[in-house]
Structures are given as structure tokens and as C-alpha cells.
Image (cartoon, helix red, strand yellow):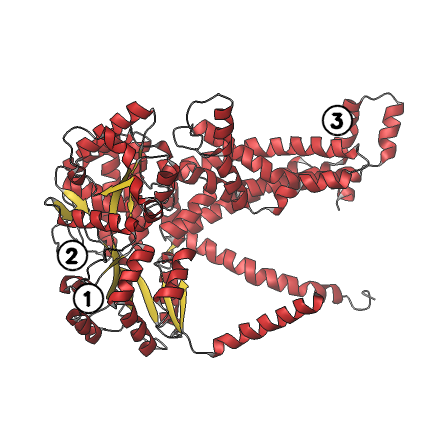
Amino acid sequence: MKRITSFGILASTVLAFASPVLAQTVFVSTQLRPIEEATVVRQDLLKDAGNVDYVVEEPPQFAVRMEAEAKAGKHTVSLVGALHGELSPLADKDQLEPLDDLAKKLAGGGMPQSLLDLGKLGKSSQQYIPWMQATYVMAARKEALQYLPKGADINAITYDQLIEWGKNMQQATGQPQIGFPAGPKGLMARYFQGYFYPSFTGGVVRTFKNADAAAGWEKLKVLWAYVNPNSTNYDFMQEPLAAGEVMVAWDHVARLKNAISASPDDYVVFPPPAGPKGRGYMPVLAGLSIPKGAPDAAGAMKIIETLTTPGIQLLTASKVGFFPTLNVQLPPDLDKGVALLAGAVAETQTAKDAVISLLPVGLGDKGGEFNKAYMDSFQLIVLQNQPVGDVLAKQGAVMAKLMTDTKAPCWAPDAKSDGACPVQ
Amino acid sequence: MTQNRPWIPYLLILPSVVFLGLLFIVPLVQTIWLAVSEDGAPSLANMQRMVTDINFMQSVRNTFLLTIVVVPVQIAIALAMGTMVAKIGRGRETILWIWTIPLGISDLAAGLVWLSILQNSGYFNSLLFSLGVISRQASWLSYQTPVALFIAIAVAEIWRGTAIVMVIIVAGLNQVPKEFKEAAEIFGAGPWTRFWKITLPLIRPALQSALILRTVLAFEVFAVVYALGGRNFPVLVGEAYNWQNQNQNYSVAAAYAVLIMVISLAATLVYLKAFKVDPERLP
């Protein structure tokens, strides 16, 4: 036994030292981090992309690593996969290789020009290649549908109807049945930036503290009476949905997918509610970039080409719930849960009252503090019941300082600005 | 030996001093500078930012409240456990071993254990439901139930942290000479008097170490709170973590770190003054 163990140790040591000898293309990604998803990337998506070392990093560490490599001039990373907003600071600092030839080729292969243009990040050359997209939707267990207010169309629900629905469910079941991911790792800040503010005010930064915003917050307080108080502990809504703690929830498609794919017949998926200014929604776009000085740019190019083939794009959709950036028809035999999510995404994008809200750009490393302004307002107004006007005045000042410090210009749905986006 | 070559002791402790100097003092100085500077110039902006943050007062209050409640309870329980186990002959080791199991679990794992008990669909609710006490899931860890949340965190912390106190106190109790107790017994002192007049004064050094260690750790409480309370129960270290990781403002995070260090140092000084230990009895 002892001998076998020592042989095992010896063998693994030899292997551990031997493997780095083979040249590997290092692919660092802030997306598809959970171990199940990373395994799909390694075993399925990158199967034919050569010898790739797929490494995942949390967004803060990703930013630090890229900064460190650029400053040290010693590059290990050949390819990065990250969100639009995470790549924008790198493009600002001119750290990304232009990818115009590849973009031209992909445009010919059916990638919409509008998406490719986003990958320019406001510059003249292509900074990243759109890799996969997602957005946020609402999901409900089917038994909740019986409480839907009369005459409400689930695909065109309004905040007033959602409130009434929540009230009906609470009266029938004795418990608040709506859930939001307002936990420490939840994406609640995106709800305010992409859904709440655009729906109630038609803006995100300019309208941060105006009268429409104040009215919206009052409405949210009414809604919150029917929201499960455990929401401030929820990070991924698929868990409370599957556990039966809530019947109706808002979240990122990838954070709902497990519950819905596990029992697609139990759920309906539909667009988030509309407010007085329309139905806000925020697309999420992840892109692939090659950092300047990459040790294996050719290998990275090959990985990008592999990941943007129609077959791999569809495989990505069915395995991890992120949707293709190529203009491809989702196959009829798609995972049923993913098909439900895809249907709701299409409904949202084509809704007549849709108000598109882009991810924040130009905030550099202040993205976290930008989120904090919304979450602090939420905590003070909704959870601690402080006067809306006072809170918005204070947090509005924080927001205004953030904008002048970063000089970030307005992005949609706010009207364009000369210089820093003003808080009006 | 060492009298001929007086530098030998210094040489022997040099590696550890260099090690601590490099990996502790340098980052400490850097952290302090990060906290009290802005754009390379001395500034109190980060401190001001920290103090005016919406969670600051709450996190100070919660951290102190938790320390004030948890530490005395842990000391009392550890004293009781230590005294009880002293009377046991056979199986003493096994009992001690079982009692110290929580020591082997990481903070976060301990938090997750209690989360699985206390969350809506957890074991505690299942038990209450099967006993007919509640008719549907009750929440114990939400922002609407601050008292239950506080009790839950305190219980989890007591469960997790008592073992270390007990280990120190058992070691102290082992050093109390039996003769003292026997003499007291002969003079007619009851068990209570013996405990107050003999055991407690004699284990003072152990008690002091246990108090310092536990209090400093209590001010640094994080993982258990993070698992059970999330955003609902801000504590100082949790806020430092949020500023570092979520808000990505390292300077305000450093300000929190410095504040926690100052509080811990102050607490240690208070204990050193309050429990004046006879220098001859120091280990």
C-alpha cells in the first residue's frame, strides 16, 4: 500500500512538472466561473481550440491582474473574456489589440453589426469580439398564475399589476411570494440601473433624484410589502424558486437557469414589469479580447474563432444559458428551460414599450461605488424606511461627485452629455 | 555557551523577526498610509468617508454588541466545562476531543452549518413545524427579525469559539495544585467558595490570555456573520471586505482595517491593566 502511495505521489509530481512544458494559451475569464460552467468550457466548448488553459477570475481580481501584467510588462494572458463594462477600462488605457479583421469576417458570417459596434467601446477600432449575451427576466412558478390580476397579460405586466399580484399571492398563501436577489452577491444593483430607473424615470444617472425617481421609490416601497424579507439574503434566485420560498422572481437568466431547466414544466418566464416611462431592460454582453503583448496571439485568435462558430455558440446556449451573439436560429431540440428563457428574452427585446439601458461605461474602477449609490438608497428608503427626498438628495450628491470624478459621459437611456453625466 | 557568545540568541531569533518585519510591519505601514492619504498626500478623506457611510455606526454597534454578549458567555461556559471535566477520570480525553470539534471547522463552514439549520427551509423550522409550533416557514435571519438574527449569530459564534477558550482554561486549571483545594476542603470551604477564592485567582493568567484572544477574535468576526446575516448585519470586518471587494475602494477598506486594529489594541491594553498578573506567574 505504502509503495503504491509513494508511486502515486511520484507520478503526480512528475506530471505536475511535466505539463507546463507544453505551451498553453492562457484564457482568463470573469464569466462562466462556477465549477460546473468552467468544466463545460474546458471539456466541451474549447475541445477543438488547441491547448487552452481556461482560468477564471472574479471581476475585481481580473482588473488587478490585467493592471499588474500591463505595468510589469510581463504578459501571461493571451485571451480575456469579460463583460462589456469590465473590458472598457482596459480599452480606455489602450491595452487591447485591435481585432478589425476578425470583426469583418464575423460580420460576413452573420454577427449583427449593431453588436460588433458595441465591441468598439467608442473607439475607431474593434476592441472586443462579442462572445455571448444575456439579460434579466422574471420567472414564476405556474401555481402563481391563478393569482395574476384579472386582465393582466403576463408578457406585458406593469408595476401596478405586479403589486396586485403580490398582494393576491400573499393573501392566499399567507406569505410574501416575490423575490429579488438583494443578497451580498446578488445583482440587485443592476435591477435599479437597468430596470427600475429606466422604467420609472427614463434615465439612470440624470434622473437619479428627480420627482419621477421619488415616485418610483414610493411605488417600490408598496411592492416591497409583498416581497419576501429573505430577499436581502438571496444571491441566485434559482435557489429560493426551486425551494418553494418564493413564487415569482427577477434575476439574470444564467442565475435562473438551474431551477427552470430542472423542471421547465413548472415555470413561466416573462419580461420584467413596465413603469410610467416604459419597460426598462439591460442587455448583458460578454466579449473576447486579446491584451497587447499577449504571448500567444495566434492561439487566442483561434480560440475566438472557435467560440464564435454557430455550433459552439448554440452549445454555449444550451449548456450555460448565455445566448449567441451570432444571428443563429436556436434549434428546436434546445434544452427546454433555456428555450423558455430565450422566449422571454425575445419578448422583452421586442416589447413595444422597451427602454434599453446599456451597461455603465467610463466609470473605470468606480463601478463598485456606482452600484453602492443605488444599493445604499435602497437600504435607506426601502429597508429602513427613511424619507425618500432626504435620501435621494444625499445619494444624488454622492452620484454627482462620482460622475465628476470619473468624467463618465451619459449612456443610454440618459440623453448624451458633453463631459461628465450630470445628476439633475 | 551563550555567555561566551551573547549574539547567539539574537542570531536564532533573527529569521522570525525578519519574517514578521517583512510580512507584517511593511504591509501594516502601507495599510496605515493607504488609510490616511489620498493621491499620495496625507488626508483624512478616507476616514471621513468611512465615518459618514450609512453602515458605519451600525457596524460599530453590532461588532461591540456581539463582543459584549459573546465573550462573557463563552468564558462562563468554558469555565463550567473545564471544571466539570476536571472531575472526570475515564473518558476525559474523549469528552475534550468532542468538545473541541468546532475548532477544526473553518469560520465560513461554521456559518454555513448554522445557515442550514436556521434558514427558511432549515432543520430548525422543520422541527418547529413537526412539533406543531409553526404552521408555515418562519424567517429568523431577515432584516425584519433583527433580534432573532442577532441571537442566531451570537449562538453560532458561541458554538464556534468556546472551544478555544476552553482549551486555554483547561490548561490553566491543570496547573492549580491539588493541595490548595484539599487544604481548603479541610478548613470547611464549600465548592463555591473554593472556586471563587482559589481556582479563579489561580487561573488568572490563563483567563487573561483567553480573554485577550477571544475579544480580539470577536472584533474580527466576519465569516459567520456573512453566512448568516449577509447585508442584514453589518460588522466592521464585513464593511472592510465590502469596500475592498465590491466597492473596490482600497483606501476606505484600509481605514476600516486600521480602526479594527486600534480597537483590538485598546481592548488588549484594557485586559492587561485590568488583570494585573503577578510577573512570577507569567508563563
Q: Which residue is mark 2?
A: A419
Quick check: A353 left or right of A14? left
**Residue B6 left/right relative to B133:** right
Residues at marks 3 and 2, common chain?
A: no
Amino acid type shown at disc 1: Lys
- Judge whether residue B168 can be spotted in this image: no
Amino acid type of the residue that numbered disc 3 sits on in the rendered structure: Trp
Name the spot of residue A214 as percent of width and height, x first.
19, 34
Local SS, label 1: loop
Q: Are marks 1 and 3 on the same chain?
A: no
Question: Separation of disc 1 and disc 2 at Cα?
Answer: 20 Å
Residue placed most toward the observer, B280 or A370: A370
Q: Chain of mark 1?
A: A
- Taking the view exactly as shown, the residue that stands out farthest to the front is A333
Q: Depth check: give the residue in front, A249 or B79.
A: A249
Location of residue B149 with respect to A29 vertically, above or below: above
Distance, label 3 to label 2, CA atoms, is 73 Å
Q: Which numbered tag is attached to residue A14? A: none
Residue that label 1 marks: A120
Would residue A296 be seen by someone viewing this image from the given angle? yes
Q: Amino acid at mark 2?
A: Gly
Dot 1 and dot 2 within a common chain = yes
